[in-house]
Image (tube, rainbow, N blue to C red):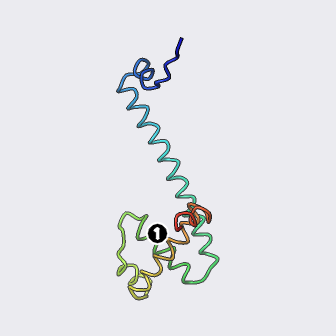
Amino acid sequence: MEIDTDIDMYLKDVFSQEDLKLRSLTGYKARTKKMMEYTDMMIGAYKRYTDKRDDAAHRRYFTLVHMFTTEHKCTFMEVAEQLGVTERTSQRDQKEAIKEFSIFLFGIVSLEEMVS
């Protein structure tokens, strides 16, 4: 006797399509919530890291937060005006902040793998 291992066949027999969609969406929602909690935790860790550094580190944190996480996404010019720096400096700060924050999110090993 051969055992059929087609999981889709069993799922269709046990759950309706609507049930499967609901279970799938619920799973996505739970994973998204966990990812956002982790991201918020890493933003807090990045803030504590920059609090112990120089003014440039504080600028990078401010730039990252105001360009990506606030309701009103600031432009390079808006960030530059708020910090009293040039637009080019805010562009460099954003690039460096993304590099630094990536390490908090993914770790140094993962960052190296993404680059290579």
> Residue 33: horizontal and vertical position, in percent?
49, 47
In the displayed structure, would residue 8 be above or below residue 110?
A: above
In the displayed structure, would residue 55 be above or below residue 17?
A: below
> Residue 86: horizontal and vertical position, in percent?
40, 88
Q: Residue furthest right?
A: 52
Q: Quadrant of residue 74?
A: bottom left
Q: Quadrant of the N terminus?
A: top right
**What residue is rendered at 43% in x and 88% in y?**
85
> Residue 52: horizontal and vertical position, in percent?
64, 77
Q: Quadrant of residue 51?
A: bottom right
Using the image as rendered, state which of residue 34 and residue 96 is in the foreground.
96
SS at mark 1 in the image? helix
Is residue 63 toward the left or the right of residue 41 in the image? Answer: left
Labels in figure, total: 1
**What residue is rendered at 54% in x and 64% in y?**
43
Q: Residue furthest front?
A: 1
Pointer 1 local density, CA inside 10 Å: few below 14, some 14–19, many at least 20:
some
Residue type at mark 1?
A: Val
Residue wearing tag 1: 65
> Residue 75: horizontal and vertical position, in percent?
35, 75
**What residue is rendered at 37% in x and 22% in y?**
16
